Each structure stands twice: as structure tokens, then as C-alpha cells.
Amino acid sequence: MKNIVGFAAIAAAIFAVPAFAHHSHSMFDDTQKIVMEGTVKEFQWTNPHSWLQVVVTKDGVTKEWSLEMGSPAGLSRGGWRPKTILPGDKVTVTIHPLKDGNPGGSLVVVKLPNGKTMGEEGYE
């Protein structure tokens, strides 16, 4: 009986970890989409979410945008690889911006330098 209870406790803990790791998408304004051209500073292939850092210059002002993406496992299913985007790549991104107005958001679609488009239809 002790083994069954112990096994059940371990199983519950294992399956609970992903639920605690996930967070709400409420910080993003999903009613808006912003399209920007910029230069990739960094592509972070990390769990639980990957990140794309893009430097955008508009009206003479340069800002670095932090764009949240899906998990590496989800991105892989959509055809992404750790070197899909490289520092220095010129990209066009479509994002759901942060509600607080800071330079960041949730990546929707990215147009790569070779013209290929990747994004929400590929991993969400």
C-alpha cells in the first residue's frame, strides 16, 4: 500500500510541474498586431519559452524589443531550429504588443531574410 501511495504522489508531482511553469498570456494585447522591421540581436532557444531580441529603429529612435515565443519543443514541431534566426539577420516581425507599452510582445509571425514566413500557424 505504501508503494502505491508513494507512486501516486510522485506521479502527481511530475504532472503538476508543467502546470506551474506555464503563465498567463494576459500581459499581451491580443487585439492588436504591430508589424516592425529590425535586426536580430539574439535568438534564445530556452525553456519554457524561447525569446527573440530584435533591434528596431523608427523615427531615429532605436529600441530593443523582447519577443516571447513558444517552447523549443513546440517550435521544433513547426519547423524551427536553434539556428533558424541568427544575430544580424534582418527580419520583419508581427507581434501582439505588451499592454503596458514597453518594447516587447508575443511573436505572431516573422519573415526571415530568405523570404520564408514562420509563426503562429507553425507552432500554436
Image (spheres, rainbow, N blue to C red):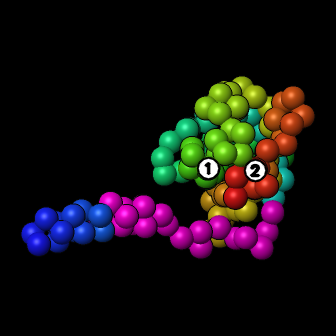
Label 1 sits on residue: 74
Q: Give the side of residue 72 with respect to residue 17, left or right.
A: right
> Camera-side residue: 91 or 19?
19
In this view, the residue farthest toward the right is 115
Label 2 sits on residue: 122
Q: Give the side of residue 7 with respect to residue 69, left or right.
A: left
Residue 104 position in % (x across, y down): 64, 55
Q: Which image quarter holds the N terminus?
A: bottom left
Q: Which image quarter holds the C terminus?
A: bottom right
Res 14 visible? yes
Q: Residue at x 65, y 28 (%)?
A: 83
Residue 119: numbered disc: none
In this view, the residue farthest toward the front is 1
- Magenta segment: does it hold 22? yes
Residue 102 position in % (x across, y down): 63, 59
Could you tell me the amino acid type at mark 1?
Answer: Gly
Res 37 visible? no
